[in-house]
Structures are given as structure tokens and as C-alpha cells.
């Protein structure tokens, strides 16, 4: 009888041990994977659409810059130390720097800002598009002697300038306060309401390009240019916020060679 009770107790203990190990074997696989596959919190944070108005504020507050010896060009958001597009003269030499750029992916109009103020000075414009392709260059007079690589940035401006490519010379004249033209069929028009803007129009089907050259805000140390490259009956447009156009002229160029121009006129 004692032998039977001892055998029965051993069987019961073995069953208990087996059941505990079986239970542990069933529980352990459920605990470990649950902690391993937990999704990070950032995966649940909504991401702003690239086309939303908040996309400009989500980018870095630091400007994007390109440099060559003697010049630094930057494009920055409103909150940076260099909002809009700027060009700095970084060397004391016989050249002056300029920034050349295109707006909103459209290559039919090129813009140039010449910084004539001297070493250590910065000039530019706050009015930029949603997409800006730009580079730094060095000029001696009107002749470009050196240029850097192109760089493209997006969504830097909180209120970017819209692309406007369907304006004809007739429409520019109708919308403008003043217009001037030169032999060779280049037209420069501008208006000053809430936002000051300038048109450069090509009115002849030839190999030459129309160009507007002007100064804003009475500052003689920054010369602005609009090169209209798209051809007959097309106009390029630039905006300058509340700054007034102070001097302006229309010119015609064969690439970099001036074909026709006029004397600057004062506004």
C-alpha cells in the first residue's frame, strides 16, 4: 500500500511539472513578439502635404547656399537671417558678384541680381517662387567671368511668387503704369500698386533676347535684370513687394552681347 501511495505521488508531481512547462512554453512566444513589433509613435504622426501652406514652415530655418571664390548666393525662408534670394560679395577684387536664377521650374525667363556694393555687402530680393534654381557668378562690368554650379531648392517662401508665363506685350502694357521700348523690339513695363512688378517682353521673332535692366528702392548698388528667353510675344515678370522702381531701361542681347539699348530713365 505504501509503495502504491509513493508511486501515485511521483506521477502527480511529474504531471504538475509537465503542466507548468507546457504553460510556460505557450505563454513565452506571445510575450516576446508583442514587444518586438511595437510601432514607433512617429509612424502615427500625420505628415503635411507638400502642397499645403504649412510645408514652408516645416523646412529648416537655415538658408541653402552655393559658393564660388568671391561670391556666396543663398536662398532662405522668411525666418532665416537671409530671407528670399541674396548674393554676398566675399572678396576685395575687381569683380562684382551676381546671383542668376530661375523661378518655379520655368526656363523661359532668367533673373539676375548684381551686387555692386563691395566686399562684405549683401543684396537680394525677398520675392521668390516655390521652386528656385540658382547659382553664384562673378562679373567684370557686363561680362561674366566665372559661374558656379546650379542648385535647386523648394518650399522656402511662405507666400511664393506664382508662375506667370502667358502675359503678352499688349497685356503687359495694359496692366502697367509705365512702359519703355528700344530698337530691336524689347519692352520694359512696370506697375506699383500693393506689389511692385516689372515685365520684360520680346516683340520680335529673331535670335535676340529681350532684357529689362532696372534698380529698385533708390539703391544704386543692386542692379536687377530679367532675361526673356521664350521668344516672340512672351513676357517675363518679377515682383518686388513694396519697393519702387527707381531707374529702368529696355535692352536687346545676343547671348551676352548687347545689340541695342537705351539710356536709363528715372521713375
Image (cartoon, rainbow, N blue to C red):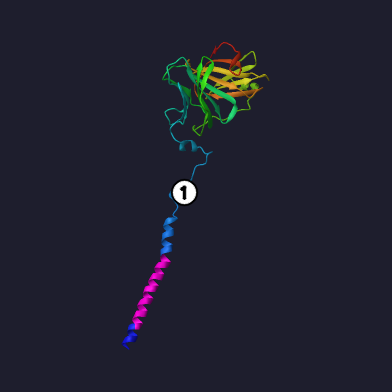
Q: How far across and how far down the image is residue 103, in percent?
A: 55, 28
Task: Look at the picture and state if 153 lies above or below 145.
Answer: below
Q: Nearer the viewer, residue 149 or 194?
A: 149
Residues in magenta, as a range: 7-27
Is residue 262 rendered to the left or right of residue 120? right
Residue under pointer 1: 43
- Asked whether residue 17 appears in the rendered view, the answer is yes
Farthest residue, direction right: 205
- Is residue 167 shown above or below 17? above
Quarter containing the N terminus: bottom left
- Is 4 or 222 nearer to us in this picture? 4
Left or right of 65, for residue 265: right
Asked if residue 177 shows in the view, the reply is: no
Q: Residue at x 34, y 81 (%)?
A: 9
Task: Say which of 260 and 141 sits in front.
Answer: 141
Q: State yes or no: residue 115 in magenta.
A: no
Q: Horizontal and vertical percent for residue 254?
A: 62, 17
Q: Seen from this angle, which residue lies furthest left?
A: 2
Q: How crowded is mark 1: few (under 14 residues within 10 Å), some or many (20 or more)?
A: few
x, y percent for residue 42: 44, 47
Our reading of the magenta stretch's main secondary structure is helix
Q: Quadrant of residue 200?
A: top right
Quarter occupied by residue 30: bottom left
Amino acid at each position: 500500500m505504501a509503495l502504491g501511495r509513493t508511486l501515485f505521488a511521483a506521477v502527480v508531481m511529474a504531471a504538475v511539472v509537465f503542466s507548468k512547462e507546457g504553460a510556460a512554453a505557450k505563454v513565452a512566444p506571445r510575450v516576446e513578439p508583442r514587444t518586438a513589433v511595437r510601432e514607433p509613435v512617429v509612424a502615427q504622426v500625420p505628415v503635411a502635404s507638400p502642397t499645403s501652406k504649412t510645408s514652408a514652415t516645416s523646412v529648416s530655418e537655415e538658408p541653402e547656399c552655393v559658393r564660388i571664390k568671391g561670391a556666396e548666393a543663398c536662398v532662405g525662408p522668411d525666418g532665416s537671417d537671409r530671407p528670399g534670394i541674396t548674393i554676398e560679395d566675399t572678396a576685395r577684387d575687381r569683380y562684382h558678384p551676381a546671383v542668376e536664377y530661375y523661378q518655379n521650374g520655368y526656363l523661359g525667363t532668367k533673373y539676375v541680381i548684381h551686387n555692386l556694393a563691395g566686399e562684405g555687402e549683401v543684396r537680394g530680393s525677398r520675392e521668390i517662387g516655390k521652386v528656385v534654381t540658382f547659382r553664384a557668378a562673378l562679373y567684370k562690368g557686363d561680362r561674366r567671368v566665372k559661374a558656379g554650379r546650379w542648385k535647386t531648392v523648394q518650399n522656402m517662401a511662405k507666400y511664393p511668387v506664382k508662375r506667370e508665363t502667358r502675359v503678352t506685350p499688349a497685356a503687359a502694357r495694359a496692366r502697367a503704369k509705365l512702359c519703355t521700348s528700344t530698337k530691336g523690339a524689347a519692352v520694359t513695363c512696370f506697375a506699383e500698386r500693393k506689389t511692385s512688378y516689372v515685365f520684360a517682353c520680346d516683340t520680335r521673332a529673331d535670335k535676340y533676347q529681350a532684357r529689362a535692366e532696372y534698380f529698385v528702392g533708390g539703391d544704386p548698388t543692386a542692379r536687377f535684370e530679367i532675361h526673356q528667353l521664350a521668344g516672340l510675344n512672351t513676357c517675363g515678370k518679377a515682383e518686388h513687394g513694396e519697393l519702387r522702381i527707381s531707374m529702368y531701361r529696355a535692352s536687346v542681347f545676343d547671348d551676352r552681347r548687347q545689340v541695342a539699348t537705351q539710356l536709363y530713365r528715372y521713375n
